[in-house]
Image (cartoon, helix red, strand yellow):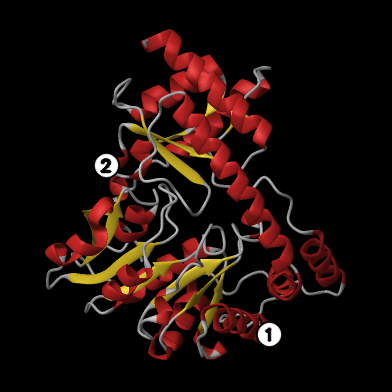
Amino acid sequence: MFSSKIEEIQPFLVMDILRKANDLERDGKKIVHLELGEPDFPTPKVIVESAKKALKDGNTHYTNSLGILELRKSISDYYNETYNLNISSNRVIVTNGTSPAMLILFKLLLEIDDEVIISDPHYACYPSFITCTGAKPVLVPFKNFSSEVTNYITDKTKIILINSPSNPTGTRLRKEEIEKLSALHPVIVSDEIYHGISTGIRDHSALEFSDNSVVINGFSKFFAMTGWRLGYMIVPECFVRKLEILQQNFFISANPFVQIAGITALKEAIPEAKLMNQIYTKRRKLALEGLESINLETRPHPDGAFYALFNVSNFEKDSMKLASEILTSAGVALAPGKDFGPRGEGHLRLSYCNSEENIEKGINLIGKFLKEKYL
């Protein structure tokens, strides 16, 4: 399954920052955590109680490798209602989070030296998923992604991978942009893990514009279920059997009690998830205003996910070095922009998955550090 070039797999630097932050906390230093894209909310109680009941009822055995049928039906119903679609549950494959979904999907679709177009900056792990198959990521500037992408398509291009709302920028592709990308000949793979965490007009799924698109999504962000590791794909029916075989071989099935909790999430916890989104919207405004108050530029302004990527190149071009200094000196953990590709370097990412009090405190400490060291 994997390329032998393990050295091409880059470290996930934000996890190194987290490890250092945890080490500092063990030594007694207080840290404001603004580094991880992990909701600080507890998983809704109704979901937790559902999993507890499932365990008590003995749901601890393998399931069908495609996932529990009721969950697959709940996912297709959710997409159909949210995006005005008519997707069959036969096209849904349940996975242990979105990472296994990408791994088996890319194993199916990619061969050595194939190319996958991704934006720059991008989610840190995309290149690793791609290079594991022997294929190559091709980076297109994020700012003009939809208009420039055709300049990067070759006869080796097999996938255009999009992520809207985006990690790390928190921005979204417009409806017209997704429609334009969906009309191109490579397969569109749409990572929709941040759908529902946005402000203003609703998010648009690639499936609204092409039945040949592949959607990857999960429960981690919208339902505050990161540790549950529950994801899914919606794929063309001609992919299903081959992906089922890969799932059987590599992962067997997602955890049964977690799948049952996923059914409950979609049937009973959406109102609570929407309340979380309202809180993220308030935090987003607070974070952006706070960064602006200490003269840190966030362009374009995010309107989705829970990230702000801001420019620090006037202070230090090595984002990992600066993130480490801010962590040790100011006690604020941030993600280095270097994680997210060449155009991420010179930036830091702030995740506002934290309380308003900690967002304000963290930004004030960042401002104080930069003023004392550089101004």
Instruction: Say if 146 sits above or below 264 in the image.
Output: above
Residue 147, image quadrant: bottom left
Measured in 3D between alpha carbons, the distance from the residue under mark 2 to the one under mark 1, in whole angstroms, is: 42 Å
Q: Residue at x 54, y 26 (%)?
A: 363
In the rendered image, residue 187, in percent from the top left (x then y), is placed at 29, 76
Q: Residue at x 45, y 30 (%)?
A: 292
Q: Are marks 2 and 1 in contact (CB under 8 Å)?
A: no
In the rendered image, residue 303, in percent from the top left (x then y), is placed at 47, 52
In the rendered structure, which amino acid carries the disc numbered 2? Arg
Residue 151, image quadrant: bottom left
Secondary structure beneath label 1: helix
Relative horizontal placement of residue 322, taking residue 194 as reference (left or right): left
Relative horizontal placement of residue 325, taking residue 115 as reference (left or right): right
In the rendered image, residue 320, in percent from the top left (x then y), is placed at 38, 28
Residue 175, image quadrant: bottom left
Label disc, if present, on residue 70 of the rendered structure? 1
Label disc, if present, on residue 343 of the rendered structure? 2
In the rendered structure, which amino acid carries the disc numbered 1? Glu
In the rendered image, residue 133, in percent from the top left (x then y), is placed at 30, 64
